[in-house]
Amino acid sequence: MASLRSDQSQPRAGLAFPARGRWSLPVYELAASGLALLAAMALAWLYIVDQAQGMGNRAGTMGLGAWAFLGMWAVMVVAMMFPSVTPTGFSLAGRNAANLADKTPARGMLWRLARAAAFLLGYFAVWVAFGFAVYGVLTGAAGLVHLSASDDKWVAAAVYAVAGAYQFTPAKRACRDRCRSPRCAAATAAGRPSWWSVAWESTHHALTCIGCCWAYMAVLIAVGLMNVVAMAILTVAIFVERYFLPRVLVSNGVGILLIAAAVLTPFFGWLHPGLSGGAVMPMHM
């Protein structure tokens, strides 16, 4: 892995990225942090399930105001994206642990977990900002385009086709490879990652994830933003695509399925319930 150099031309420690290296967190820190994040993700899913029962499978902004939409989007980020990014946060927390020998165990624990929390919060903030942009696009589209009921299936087919085709593009490949390749973050001369370097890495990683996953989010336009079954399927797809080999085959396989959905959706209303108000996607999918 390439190293960063200080002004004195001495190697500067970096943060291996993403979470493919060894975790050096103590077991009790890892367990406590993991349980806390699992609890947050579980609460997010419970909230989504509860809201979905009352909101149905409406497409677009679901008639929500900006702040209500952003609140729902934020919960979706925790539920759908945190399962994949949490290992990266844990890996970050354990980096450069050897440089903390001058600290007490308690202070060392706080140092590591504070930087992991900073990474996750920065990642979360970028995704929420992206949600604000999504709200603007959906609101603008709703004001400009008025579709008849017979056109819904073709819009859904187009969404599936674009999302599927994107899986095979150089942009998708570049984001996917960047997400799993080792790289460095700037560190202090003492070999400890600065707050700014952690914030920069979390922002860069979030943008890379958006580059990988925006097409998956677009699929929710066709199936409904609060379609719990579709959200669960996409969450698993995102996780598998990142961590399981061979990643290219996984990504291409998802692309093929999305293109197949584009071909079939004009004939099966349950493939685009968000636009047509049809039945919810079958659980066996």
Image: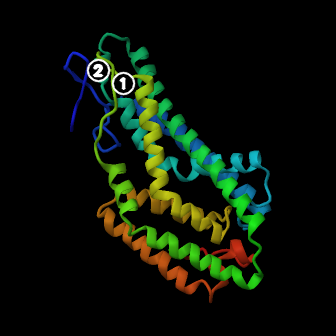
Picture layout, residue 102 above or below residue 2: above
Residue nearest the viewer, comparing 245 with 258: 258
- Left or right for 183, reference 115: left
- Whether tag 2 and tag 1 are in contact, CB under 8 A, the answer is no
Instruction: Locate the C terminus by quadrant.
Output: bottom right
Picture layout, residue 59 above or below residue 70: below
Image coordinates of residue 120 in percent, x first then y, are: 50, 37
- Left or right for 86, reference 22: right
- Determine which quarter of the picture holds residue 56: bottom right
Image coordinates of residue 126 in percent, x first then y, are: 55, 42
**For residue 193, which numbered disc appears in the image?**
1
Residue under numbered circle 2: 191
- Name the residue located 30 percent from the left edge and 25 percent from the top edge: 96
**Residue density around tag 2, few if under 14, some if 14–19, many if 20 or more, within 10 Å:** some
Extreme-bottom residue of the structure: 267
Tell me the kind of residue under disc 1: Pro
**Residue density around tag 1, few if under 14, some if 14–19, many if 20 or more, within 10 Å:** many
Tell me the kind of residue under disc 2: Gly
Residue nearest the viewer, comparing 281 with 138: 138
Picture layout, residue 276 above or below residue 76: below
- Name the residue located 77 percent from the left edge and 81 percent from the top edge: 148
